[in-house]
Amino acid sequence: MAVYTGLVVMSVGVLLLVFMFYLAHRLLAVSTDPLTALPYQSGWQPDEHALSRFHVRWYLATLLFLAFDVEMLFMYPWAVVVAELGASAIVEMFLFLGALFVAVFWAWREGALRWV
């Protein structure tokens, strides 16, 4: 039982800390209704409601951004080990970049890069 004493003490401490943060939020919050509380946009009053919908073209732009973000996620570790792996790593990276180029070409054809 003495083995779990530290675990129990830490769990109780974390629960108390979370409860204190929750209580501080409830006491210091301007409004408890999220639909009536106005978010700040760089100090200006918002022009639209916080829960307003976005145009569908922004979702395509977001997916395109995520594709390039994931590309960078794969390219950094690849750049570290490319000298050790040799020509096969270069061929694999160009195949990966080719697949991304096909995705960008498709997005361009669908109009995801058109902002008007």
Image: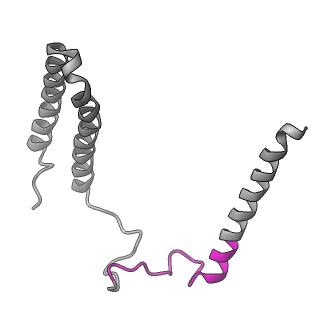
Render colour scheme: one colour
The quadrant of the image that shows the N terminus is top right
In the rendered view, does 51 fall on the left or right side of 63?
right
Q: Nearer the viewer, residue 82 or 17?
A: 82
In magenta, the rendered stretch is 22-42
Residue at (79% x, 56% y) in the render: 12
Residue 11 vertical placement versus 81 (above, below): below
What is the count of numbered marks?
0
Residue 32 vertical placement versus 108 (above, below): below
Residue at (71% x, 70% y) in the render: 20
- Which of the 4 image quadrants contains residue 69? top left
In the rendered view, does 73 fall on the left or right side of 28?
left
Residue 48 drawn at (x, y percent): 33, 77
Residue 101 vertical placement versus 39 (above, below): above
Residue 110 drawn at (x, y percent): 13, 43
Residue at (84% x, 37% y) in the render: 3
Residue at (15% x, 29% y) in the render: 97
Residue 37 drawn at (x, y percent): 49, 81
Residue 71 drawn at (x, y percent): 24, 36
In the rendered view, does 33 fall on the left or right side of 55?
right
Q: Which of 106 and 72 is in front in this view?
A: 72
Q: Is residue 89 magenta?
A: no
Q: Main secondary structure of the magenta part?
A: loop
Residue 74 vertical placement versus 88 (above, below): below
